[in-house]
Image (cartoon, rainbow, N blue to C red):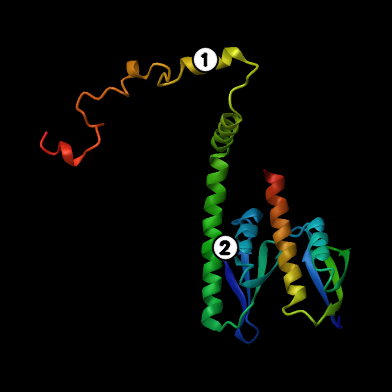
């Protein structure tokens, strides 16, 4: 049995126990999914190799349907977190590179490094000291002129 | 402050970090006394002097905090 399985379900005490295959769900996925539920249930984790055991007790009263819904939501959350875990692992290097660039960009150019400052100026898309040459202030079609009622006939 | 109940909680050592349990015990120190010891695969937490003057389940909230702290610690150590 690899799918999550309801081991016990007791509406009188609003408790539910699920078991999960340890090979199927990494521990980090289990933590992440359990974390989502701690605002509405008391969650206790245990393990009996080869399965994790997850005990829930609702903070409010829960009938059987609500407990089964809770189990289903937890299984969905496990899948969502497993996918998230996989995507993060697959893109770890890209995430690190983007984060490094963002931090470096936020720090701004180094004042002690005139070479890199010059390189940055050369690579700028628009020369702010001479914007006309780059064309962004040229307006051959007159679309940049604000519309006014007095110019209605023209 | 009224003190009444006591309870024992077993937390699997592979799933709960000891420092996370200690941090949770610190958080709830005003509401109960906590003694943690290792027994085989589990940390056994003896919770005594649980105050009845507070609304809610102190022991269960303690377990949630221990879980949340462990998850946070693991996330931090992976980063």
Q: Quadrant of the C terminus of chain A?
A: top left
Return the disc, 2 or 1, that comes first in the chain's sequence: 2
Q: Where is residue B42? Give x, y as percent.
A: 81, 64
Residue A26, visible in the rendered structure: no
Residue drawn 82% across the image and 65% down it: B25
Subunit of label 1: A
Number of other residues with Cα within 10 Å of mark 1, as a class: few under 14, some 14 to 19, many 20 or more: few
Residue B62 at x, y = what percent?
A: 76, 69
Tell me the crowding category of disc 2: few under 14, some 14 to 19, or many 20 or more residues within 10 angstroms, Cα based.
few
Q: x, y (%) of residue A15?
A: 64, 79
Figure quadrant of residue A140: top left
Location of residue A25 by image quarter: bottom right
Residue A152 at what x, y percent from top left? 14, 39
Residue sitting at x 56%, y 30%: A105
Q: Nearer the viewer, mark 2 or mark 1?
A: 1
Q: CA distance from mark 2 to mark 1?
A: 57 Å
Q: Where A26 falls versus B27 (above or below)? A: above
In the shown orientation, is residue B1 left or right of residue A59?
A: right
- The disc at residue A54 is none
Q: Are the two marked residues, 2 and 1, in contact with CB atoms closer than 8 angstroms?
A: no
Name the residue that disc number 1 marks: A119
For label 2, the residue is A2
Residue placed furthest toward the bottom: A12
- The reply to the same-chain question for discs 2 and 1 is yes
Helix, strand or loop at label 1? It is: helix
User: The residue marked by circle 2 belongs to what chain?
Assistant: A
């Amino acid at each position: 049995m690899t799918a999550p399985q309801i081991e016990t379900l007791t509406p009188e005490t609003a408790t539910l126990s699920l078991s999960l295959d340890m090979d199927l769900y990494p521990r980090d996925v289990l933590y992440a999914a359990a974390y989502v539920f701690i605002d509405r249930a008391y969650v206790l984790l245990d393990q009996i190799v080869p399965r994790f055991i997850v005990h829930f007790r609702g903070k409010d009263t829960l009938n059987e349907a609500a407990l089964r819904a809770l189990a289903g939501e937890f299984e969905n959350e496990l899948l969502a977190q497993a996918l998230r875990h996989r995507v993060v692992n697959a893109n770890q290097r890209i995430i690190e590179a983007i984060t490094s660039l963002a931090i470096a960009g936020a720090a701004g150019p180094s004042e002690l490094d005139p070479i890199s400052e010059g390189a940055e100026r050369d690579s700028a898309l628009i020369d702010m000291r001479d914007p006309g040459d780059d064309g962004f202030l040229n307006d051959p079609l007159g679309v940049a002129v604000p519309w006014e009622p007095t110019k209605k006939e023209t | 402050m009224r003190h009444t109940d006591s309870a024992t909680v077993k937390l699997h050592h592979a799933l709960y970090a000891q420092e996370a349990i200690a941090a949770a015990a610190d958080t709830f120190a005003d509401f109960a006394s906590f003694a943690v010891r290792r027994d085989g695969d589990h940390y056994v937490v003896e919770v005594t002097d649980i105050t009845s003057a507070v609304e809610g389940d102190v022991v269960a909230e303690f377990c949630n905090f221990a879980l949340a702290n462990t998850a946070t610690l693991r996330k931090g150590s992976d980063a």
